[in-house]
Image (cartoon, rainbow, N blue to C red):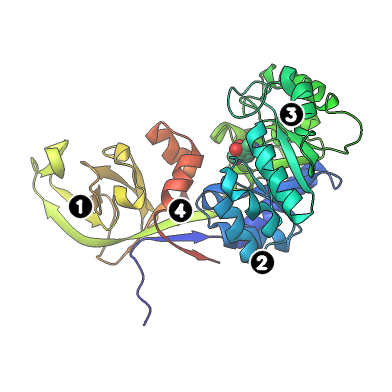
Amino acid sequence: MSVTSFNQIRVSSAALRHNYRLLQQKVGSVVSILAMVKADAYGHGMLESAQVFASVGCKNFGVAEIDEAVRLRSSGIRGNILVFLGFRPEEAELFFEYGITPLVYDLQSGAALSREAVKRGQEIIVHLKVDCGMGRLGILPEEVEAFVADLLQFPGIVIGGILSHFPKADEPESQHSFEQFSRFEGAAAKVGKPFSLVKHIANSGAVLYFPHTCCDMVRAGISLYGYYPDGPGGREREQGEKLQPAMSFITRVLQVKTVPAGTGISYGYTYTTDRETRLAVLAVGYEDGLSRSLSNRGEVLIRGKRARIRGRICMNLCIVDISDIEGVQAGDEVVILGHQGNDCISGDEIAGWMNSISYEVLCLFGNNNERTSG
Ligand SMILES: *Cc1c(COP(=O)(O)O)cnc(C)c1O
């Protein structure tokens, strides 16, 4: 008998496939999609999700660190795998051994890659990371020319791509992405002729709201998992076929009981019942990614109806009010995220209660619980 947790993340492969195909339709067939599978595919499982995307034609994958890239490659993923956070000099050999593409934004990593290239008698393709207005990783546009000249002093380095990142592509009304895109194009033009560069800057927001920035490749993250980067507003604005959320999160009722008015609930008594109240104790807490900030704010679905979280969320437990829901029993399925009956709680709704974004909700839930795909 296999033993499983009360808490189960279900990932719909059909939704992942739908989202990939929808994005491919949006960007057109000449633009490649790079599937961002960092953070364990935003909580959906890196290896499983990459395999699903590969099955519908994906040939480019993005991760944060080299160890993720090695795991992807070792699991049989083919195509290009880009590592977005750089690497330690002693890890340079891994890019050759596993055929992985590094991003370069300093000369030390160029030197480390070059030493390895010379040792092996090989070349390595790198992508140049430019900071055109994110204020994060990357060389500045005005440094590109000098940086490229220095980088090309190192034997074995081939510049195969140039990229940047938008800070405000999830703001459809903002002019900022237009300005940033022209800085990016200027920077790319300075790399010089001998290279045919793969240019990429668009994230999900840019694909949806600034499609003229798609260039050769787009880096889709949140949209592949079924969410709009600007939250519920994006889903409403969508005129055509919509992205489908792929993740749902299910827990169980452990105990049902009725307490009198005036009963303090959970640590610190941040909630006291104002009437006789029926409560369900659930097998989920902040250890499972149900953020403590949802205490007295969040809702769950039981028997297709909404139940409010009462009192503080504990490490492995929380308590919900089921006074208005008939027939709840220990063992009942409880939906934290997803559909039940005619209702649905989305990652955007939960993010709203937490004062956060769907990205964080998906990572918290997905990366702290057992996952099953279907
Ligand atoms: C995470 C990430 C993306 C994907 O962003 P989404 O908003 O999830 O589409 C694209 N590019 C870079 C550099 C990233 O770090």
**Crowding at mark 2 (Cα within 10 Å: few <14, some 14-19, many 20+):** few
Residue occupied by mark 3? 210
Q: Quadrant of residue 264?
A: top left
Residue 116: x percent and y percent? 69, 50
Can you identify the residue that label 2 sits on? Answer: 76
Dividing the image into 4 quarters, which one contains the N terminus?
Answer: bottom left
Secondary structure, mark 4, is helix
Q: Residue at x 31, y 64 (%)?
A: 332
Q: Specify the amino acid type for callout 2.
A: Gly
Mark 1 residue type: Leu
Question: Where is residue 250, by image quadrant?
Answer: bottom left
Residue 339 in the image: above or below residue 214: below
Of 271 and 146, nearer the camera is 146
**Residue 291 visible within the image:** yes
Q: Which residue position is annotated with label 1?
A: 279
- Which quarter of the rendered picture does the C terminus lie within? bottom right
Q: Which of labels 3 and 2 is toward the front? A: 2
* Mark 1–mark 4 distance (CA, rounded to whole Å): 27 Å
* SS under mark 2: loop
